[in-house]
Image (tube, helix red, strand yellow):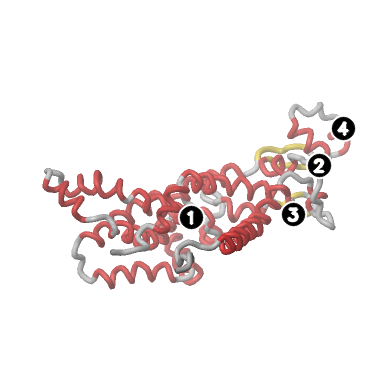
């Protein structure tokens, strides 16, 4: 008998797999690192050819992202008092002055409100629906589940015009509530299907024991099922947030000011003389942070949630 095992990979297989994973990680991270570095370049350095790998870092991109700048007459510019902070000093070097704050802060806040609001609502409604499909005899259950899933198959552009007309009639265009309801409607199909798979894996005996002990159905759901399904809820929340956070088509069509999110706003950051790539890169970097932090905080749940329910008895 040889010592070969069909379950334990050989050292060579481990080395090859590790090398492939490292290469994939490096290739994936290169664009993100490049965007991050571009945020600390000056506009001339960001468009230099060949591209500059070594450069003098500058906060001009972040200053341009959060401020609105304008030019003044030469005599007015010469009569200006000394700059009061580093932001004014950076802008003065381009012979401009700060006219006021930009709209990025408000657009970023809109993304937070709409993204996390729709994620919470999707998880709340999706958990209740998934529990009902998993535990109760629902007429035409399979047909209803397929109908719910089919809403996810439809490309957004196919329903963009009807939704635009409906929202204009109902007064939901360019509102936080309208975008939260829309993203919830899109995400709830994913939430129901994912969470149903997780709840199916929770033994019914846990709830039956709780009911025998005097718990109501809601108490058994709240105190027994929800803690067991925390892994699935966390994993589903990440996927729902990623969609709502990055969504672009509906945000462009249905928002323009009050409820506009960051994705359609970042490409419109235009500087004097052309596109301000450092400001765009700075906005993209800041835009990545909330989802990245949220995913890191729930990474253990995410890794376990991906494989949870993969093996059925």
- Tag of residue 56: 2
Circle 3 — which element? strand
Instruction: State the image coordinates of residue 291 (x, y, percent, origin top left).
Output: 52, 48
Task: Identify the residue shown where x is 45% and y is 53%.
Answer: 303
Q: Above or below — where is 238 with respect to 2?
A: above
Q: Mark 1 near mark 2, Cβ–Cβ under 8 Å? A: no
Q: CA distance from mark 3 to mark 2?
A: 20 Å
Q: Mark 3 near mark 2, Cβ–Cβ under 8 Å? A: no
Choose the circle earlier in sequence order: 3 or 4: 4
Instruction: State the image coordinates of residue 182 (x, y, percent, origin top left).
Output: 43, 58
Q: Above or below — where is 85 with respect to 28?
A: above
Of tags 4 and 1, which is closer to the observer?
1
Q: Quadrant of the N terminus?
A: bottom left
- Tag of residue 244: 1
Circle 1 — which element? helix
- Tag of residue 275: 3
Of tags 1 and 3, which is closer to the observer?
1
């Amino acid at each position: 008998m040889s010592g070969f095992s069909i379950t334990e990979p050989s050292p060579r297989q481990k080395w090859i797999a590790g090398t492939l994973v490292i290469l994939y990680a490096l290739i994936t991270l290169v664009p993100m690192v490049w965007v991050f570095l571009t945020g600390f370049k000056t506009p001339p350095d960001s468009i230099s050819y060949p591209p500059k790998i070594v450069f003098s870092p500058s906060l001009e991109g972040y200053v341009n992202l959060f401020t609105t700048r304008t030019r003044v007459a030469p005599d007015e510019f010469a009569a200006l008092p000394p700059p009061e902070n580093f932001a004014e000093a950076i802008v003065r070097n381009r012979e401009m002055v700060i006219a006021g704050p930009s709209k990025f802060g408000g657009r970023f806040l809109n993304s937070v409100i709409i993204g996390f609001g729709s994620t919470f609502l999707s998880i709340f409604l999706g958990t209740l629906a998934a529990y009902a499909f998993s535990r109760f005899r629902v007429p035409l259950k399979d047909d209803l589940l397929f109908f719910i899933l089919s809403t996810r198959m439809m490309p957004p552009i196919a329903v963009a015009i009807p939704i635009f007309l409906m929202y204009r009639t109902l007064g939901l265009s360019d509102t936080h509530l309208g975008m939260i309801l829309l993203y919830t409607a899109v995400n709830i199909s994913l939430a129901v299907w994912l969470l149903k798979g997780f709840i199916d894996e929770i033994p019914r005996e846990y709830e039956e024991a709780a009911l025998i002990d005097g718990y109501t159905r809601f108490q058994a759901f709240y105190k027994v099922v929800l803690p067991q399904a925390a892994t699935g809820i966390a994993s589903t929340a990440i996927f729902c947030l990623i969609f709502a956070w990055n969504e672009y088509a509906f945000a462009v069509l249905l928002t323009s000011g009050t409820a506009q999110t960051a994705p359609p706003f970042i490409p419109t950051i235009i500087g004097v003389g052309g596109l301000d790539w450092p400001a765009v890169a700075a906005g993209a970097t800041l835009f990545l942070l909330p989802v990245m932090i949220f995913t890191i905080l729930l990474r253990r749940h995410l890794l376990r949630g991906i494989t949870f329910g993969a093996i059925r008895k």
